[in-house]
Amino acid sequence: MNLLLQGFAWIFDPAKWTSVPGSPSIAVRLAEHLAYGAEALLLAAIIALPIGLAIGHTGRGRSVGIAMANATRALPTLGLLSLFILLLGIGDLPTVVVLAILAIPPLLAGAYSGLESVDRETVYAARAVGMTEWQVLLMVELPLALPLILGGIRASALQVISTATVAAYFSGGGLGRYLIDGLASHDYIQMVAGSILVTALALIVDALFALIQRFSVLPGVSGGTVHSKRKSHVRPPRPIAQLGKPIQEGSYQ
């Protein structure tokens, strides 16, 4: 507990928020970490969302998409980063590419499962009124599937933020620098502070995406199905008299 309190004290030390030559401030490291995450998430979205939407809309290639997503989850992060550093050299690009690869599975799953959750009767009705396939996708399926798609983006963002610390292992920036530098100098207070910062950043990003996801649900929509708010006023059927026995008074109102 004492080490944890010292970690918080390290974070709230005003000197740690002021950059000096050779020692960037917490704000700089935070900006580097967010830059890794944003670039990787954007690259992953460009690749995964069109594929996921195509699978969900057409229903084709689902097994292949699931197999690719599962295979990507099994890749070792450090090994993959080492490979891309050998191919692309030391810098931000290998880190962004590796983080994007790790962010693809949740994005892909959220996209195709979101479209699959849309009620088929709603889709058939849209086609029946003359909508093209692009109109059905953009005007019907996508708005109804948006909460699940955002759920995939939310999961990918958490994956990227928690994994971006590995960039510091190969002389990269970000909040992972506090973990690697603290380990090298046996400064465990700095390591605890770095862990607190990464955890806090992940929780804040998760809360923001949860809020966006909550307000993305259209009124009267739940689970991809449109629900009518009007109550039914259909009268119950009149009871049928049994053979040889008249209907008793008061049996139907």
Image (spheres, rainbow, N blue to C red):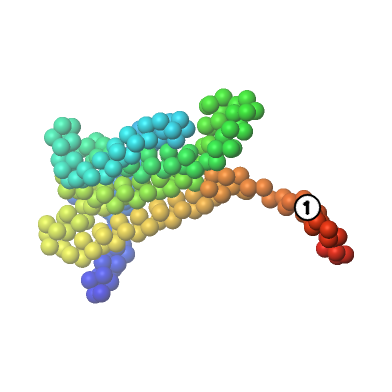
Q: Would you say 24 lies left or right of 182 here? A: right
The residue at the far bottom in this view is 2
Residue closest to the eye, 72 or 184: 72
Q: Secondary structure at mark 1?
A: loop
Q: Residue at x 31, y 49 (%)?
A: 159
Residue closest to the eye, 104 or 243: 243
Q: Residue at x 24, y 75 (%)?
A: 2
Residue closest to the eye, 26 or 180: 180
Residue neighbourhood size for the residue with mark 1, other residues' Cα within 10 Å, grouped as few (<14), some (14–19), many (≥20) = few
Quadrant assignment, res 106: top left
Compared with 194, 80 (above or below) is above
The C terminus - image quarter: bottom right
Q: Position of residue 112 (x, y in %)?
A: 42, 38
Q: Position of residue 146 (x, y in %)?
A: 50, 42
Quadrant assignment, res 10: bottom left
Residue tagged by mark 1? 237
Residue closest to the eye, 24 or 144: 144
Amino acid type of disc 1? Pro
Q: Would you say 41 lies left or right of 247 here? A: left
Q: Residue at x 16, y 63 (%)?
A: 187
